[in-house]
Amino acid sequence: MSAYPRPEAFRQQLNSLLQETRNVTWMLQTSKSKIPEFQHWYREWQQRMSDDEIMRWAVAMRNQVVKEGDLEAHSVARVTLLGSWNSPSFVDLNVPAHFSPAAVARRVSVGELPPTAAKIGVLAVERRWSVNTLPDYEVLEALAHCYGVLYELISEAHDLCQIAMADDSVERLRRTADGQEPDQGRPPRCMEISREHRTAFLRLATGELLTLGHRAIGREPDVELRLTKIMDRYGLTEAPKPIPPPTSVAELFSFAEYLVDMSKRTLMRDKTHIHIVHLISRRGIEMHVLEPVDKSEKLILYHDLAGKVARDGVMGVAGIAEAWSYRGDLNRLPDDLVDLDGVDGRGESLMVFAAWRSGEVRVWITDFVRKDDGEIQFADTKLSGREAANFLLPILAVWESQP
């Protein structure tokens, strides 16, 4: 990934990795006498890999090297216009292999746009390399898929030998996946961020390059100490109990109602609330902090989350954010209004939102005012639907497109 902008270095490392990937199955077969019922077990795996287009490609590359021309012919930049919450439009352009995403973004000419898109619009440029022998796939994503399949294969081999993979001599010396083990054939999470590193974002209104303000929330390893701190800080009489990942829309909405109470306590104590999004999948609840400074960056972040929802099989989303609300006559607002900055009647709200892959959406909105002494005074919480959460449209579009 680090060699992506340098064609020759990338080609050399690609060839090396392809050869090592092939060596995994060779070395496994040399150990077949140590693995119970190897022939039957491995025959099923061979069939599975033979049915997998990307794995067939990796095997076929055993005696072939990727040549310079193979990369040059499939050097593509996917240019996407993010101008609204709806599905973005994109075009694939053939570009010189040595062009970085930022270099492509600065050279793209955008025609006339609607007023709102011109103000908040962002150009996302993702560099993609494929090869002649696998033209429909980006190379790093193909390699990550191979890694996930091979990790599952080797893990099963350990299970057959009744040995924990984490306990073998290689793993004790250096963890294969750095604590980010693949999950049932999926690549480790450290390989799933490659798209972010291959993409540049250009704000159309100013021509400046943007970076994603997006991070995971760290957790203190001492659980009892963490719970004690939470109880003391937010005035809880008993420690919060671990919440299992919701498995239905009813459980999701129940989880969101719990967030409504906790978000009020947090805002009352801290006077501000970070923008948090929980992604719910088979892996559990994955919590993200978003740090957009304006609507353009919020547009990028939620389109980026939509991609993660598609890749990870996310079933539900729940989040918390502070938001501006309007407490005046809606008919007095201009049609091309982008935000409420400087608008009379603007107020503050605390928003909790939840959406399930069935398309059901609920939003809890609690208006509040800051008193002269700094205290927070809440109004009654009101329940709304998807009309109050347009930022979820990229995620809802992903779910609508899935079976």
Image (cartoon, helix red, strand yellow):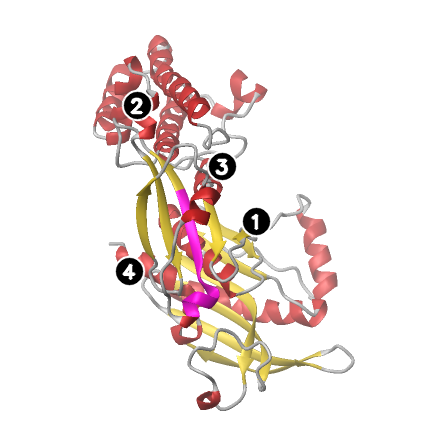
Spatial CA distance of label 4 from label 2 is 33 Å
Q: Kindly identify which numbered label has been placed on residue 400.
A: 4
Tell me which amino acid carries mark 3. Answer: Cys
Magenta residues (range)? 116-126
Q: Which element carries disc 4, helix, strand or loop?
A: helix
Q: Split into 4 quadrants, where in the image is the C terminus?
A: bottom left
Q: Hey, what amino acid is under mark 4? A: Glu
Residue at the far right: name it: 373
Nearer to us: label 4 or label 2: 2
Pointer 2: what residue?
Answer: 58
Asked if residue 191 is positioned above or below residue 390 in the image, the reply reads above
User: Tag 3 or tag 2, which sits nearer the N-term?
Assistant: 2
Q: Is residue 223 above or below residue 63?
A: below
Labels in figure, total: 4
SS for tag 3?
Answer: helix
Q: Residues within 10 Å of mark 4 (few under 14, many from 20)?
A: few
Q: Assess disc 3: are there few (<14), some (14-19) or many (≥20) residues with their C-alpha within 10 Å of its C-alpha.
A: some
- Mark 1 belongs to which amino acid? Ala
